[in-house]
Image (cartoon, grey):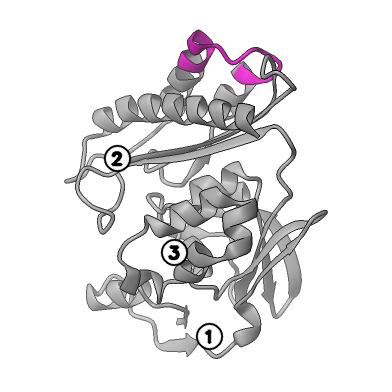
Amino acid sequence: EAKALAGGTALIYQIKRRLVSPSHLVNLKTLKTLDYIEHDYRKGLRIGALTRLRTMEKSAVIKEKYPWLARCAAGMGSVQMRNSATIGGNLCHGEPAADLPPLLMALGARVMLKGVSGERTVKLENFFIDFYETVLRQGEILCEIQVPRIPGGTGVAYLKYNPRSAMDMGVVSAAAALRLEAGGNVCRDARITLGCAAPTVIRVGEAEALLKGKKPTAALMKRAAKAASTVADPISDFRASAEYRKEMAAIYVRQAIEQAAVDAKSV
C-alpha cells in the first residue's frame, strides 16, 4: 500500500482529495543518480526519472537535439510546478491528458524499469494500461526515459487544445513525427499519437498506415486525421463532451501532421 514520492505535484493532490490513501510514502527525492540528462549521437537521449520539467525546459542539449520536448515542458503548468514535477512522475501518474506521453510516444521513447525482480525496458506505447494505471509492478520504479536518435528528414509537432491556461488539463492533444525522403515527396515513416481521447494516450496506427509510402498531400492528411478521430474513445466531463473531443481530435491530428511535414522539409 506504499506510494513512491518524486515531485509530488500529482500524488499530493490525490491524497488531499482522498483519491488515494497510501499507508506509506517512499521519498525518492534524494536519489540524485536518477536526475540527469545525457545525449549520445548514436544512442540518443537518456533522461533520469527524477529530472525536473524545468530542467528539461532549460537543457541546452534538449533545446538543440529535441527542441519539441523543451517547448512541451515549457507549456506545462507554472514555473513553480515545473520546478517540482518530474518527468518520471508525469509518466507514472498515467493521466491520459498529460502533455509528455503523446510527444514521447511519437518520438519512439522507451522507459527503463527496475525492481526487486530485475530490470526491463518497455516501449512507452505499452506502458499505459488504463486510467491512472501502468505496467509498473509492485516493488518496481521507473528509472530512465530513453528517446532514440531522430533520423534525418524527420519533422515533429505537438499540439494541445487548452481553452483557458497552461494550468488546466488539455481538452485534446496530438503529436506527429514524419520522416520524409529528400524533396519531401514521400513519407517514409510516421508516428501519430492522441492524448485526452481514450483511457490512455494512444498511437494511431490507422493514420500512420495511410501516410507511409505516399506523398503527404492535404487530402491524405485529412483522411489520416479522420482515421484518428474514428479510433478516439474519449469521455465527457466538465471540460468537453466526448463528441466535441472526437471532432477536435481530427482537427488537431491534421494540424500536427501538417506542422510535422513542414518541419521535416526544413531540416
Q: Position of residue 262 (x, y in %)?
A: 54, 27
Q: Which residue is mark 3?
A: 93
Q: Position of residue 222 (x, y in %)?
A: 45, 15
Report, in whole angstroms, how far the alpha carbon at label 2 lies from the one at label 3. 18 Å
Q: Position of residue 215 (x, y in %)?
A: 64, 12
Q: Tell me the amino acid under the disc marked 2.
A: Ile
Closer-to-camera residue (227/18): 227
At horizontal 39% and vertical 30% (from top left) the residue drawn is 252
Horizontally, residue 82 falls left or right of residue 201, namely left
At horizontal 24% and vertical 39% (from top left) the residue drawn is 236
Q: Which residue is mark 1?
A: 28
Q: Tell me the amino acid under the disc marked 1.
A: Leu
The correct choice, above or below, for 27 with respect to 205 in the image is: below
Secondary structure at badge 1 equals loop
The correct choice, above or below, for 156 with respect to 37 in the image is: above
The correct choice, above or below, for 247 with respect to 161 in the image is: above
